Amino acid sequence: MREIAPNVFVETEYHGANVAFIVTGAGVILVDAPMLPKQARHWLKEIQKRTDEPVRYIINTDHHRAHIVGNQHFPGAHVIAHENAWKEIRSYGDSFRTRLLNMYRDRMPDAVAEWEKDLRIVKPHITFTSRSVLFKGDKEIHLIAVGGHTPATSVVYLPRERVLFAGDVVVTNRPPFLSQGNTKEWLEALTYLRKLRYDILIPGHGELTGKEATQKMSEYLRMVRRRVRTAYQSGLSKGDTARSLAHLVRFWPIPPFEKPKADRRFKSGLGRVWNEIRTEELAKSRTKAKATGKD
Ligand SMILES: [Zn+2]
């Protein structure tokens, strides 16, 4: 764990997403929550070592399990997330639970044993749609919806501390998860993040970095879009496009836990991008047809 600014603590070593806590003087605010029960309890102990203020809020940067499954370990805290995250999380029922248990059964049997006894999905109590600012104690915490990675994706910006929690808009140690994304919006989000003023960028997954990481993400997304567009224009189907570009996942390191599903996941992401490009291309040809008077 590192104190990256006064009273702003970050952990990048837990399983799942990066997490942080901010001691405001009027309560503690978490950015996402460790997903494994043991690590969530460890996190709470770390917090209690440093302050006796209660955990008041948990900000979830999106609705994916790595960010939200740990909410249940901080009872009394109100969860804040984008309205679209609430819409997703409220539908997490048996199939979400079964998928989670199956995915972790072999590799994290302790966590699965605990989840089998007690898995409570805590939905957001407070939602926002474009932005919201928490003025709490001596901290000013900006929640900004940027989308791109998912329609719920938000970043957390501390202008005074010059710190940005980028959520999964930026990842550094694994391929970006494209399957619920919109790459055009994602590129716009990255352009926007380059305009904010900060020295430390905390990616959703991976080591602490700086603004340069947004550049690398943008280059990668632009490259994927270019390659998918070429495939689409040459008449490749969605499946063939995904198969022919599957190697682009190798641009990123793949954490051991992600290995078994990385290829399948990436191909499904490419399918998503193919749909997006098709929509763009069809819109383009409609505009062209209108301009030339043809139908
Ligand atoms: Zn995510």
Image (cartoon, rainbow, N blue to C red):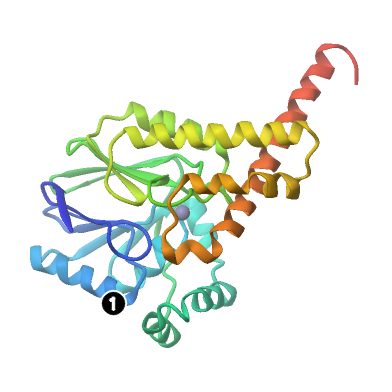
Q: Position of residue 127 (x, y in %)?
A: 42, 53
* 109 sits left or right of 178 in the view: left
Q: In which quadrant of the rendered view does residue 126 lie?
A: bottom left
Q: Quarter of the image containing the N terminus?
A: bottom left
In the image shown, does 54 or 47 lie closer to the viewer?
Answer: 47
Q: Position of residue 163 (x, y in %)?
A: 23, 40
Residue at 14% in and 55% down: 26
Q: Quarter of the image containing the C terminus?
A: top right
* 33 sits left or right of 161 in the view: right
In the image shown, does 241 or 21 lie closer to the viewer?
Answer: 241
Residue at 58% in and 52% down: 266
Q: Is residue 255 visible?
A: yes
The local crowd at label 1, few if under 14, some if 14 to 19, many if 20 or more residues have their Cα within 10 Å, is: some
Residue 125, compared with residue 148, is above or below; it is below
Q: Is residue 75 visible?
A: no
Q: Position of residue 294 (x, y in %)?
A: 90, 16
Residue with the mark numbered 1: 38
Residue at 43% in and 28% down: 191
In the image shown, does 132 or 210 lie closer to the viewer?
Answer: 210
Residue 16, compared with residue 190, is above or below; it is below
Q: In which quadrant of the rendered view does residue 93 lie?
A: bottom right
Q: Inspect the image, locate mark 1, and give the three-letter code of the amino acid beneath it.
A: Lys
The number of numbered discs placed on residues in the rendered structure image is 1
Q: Circle 1 — which element?
A: helix
* 78 sits left or right of 249 in the view: left
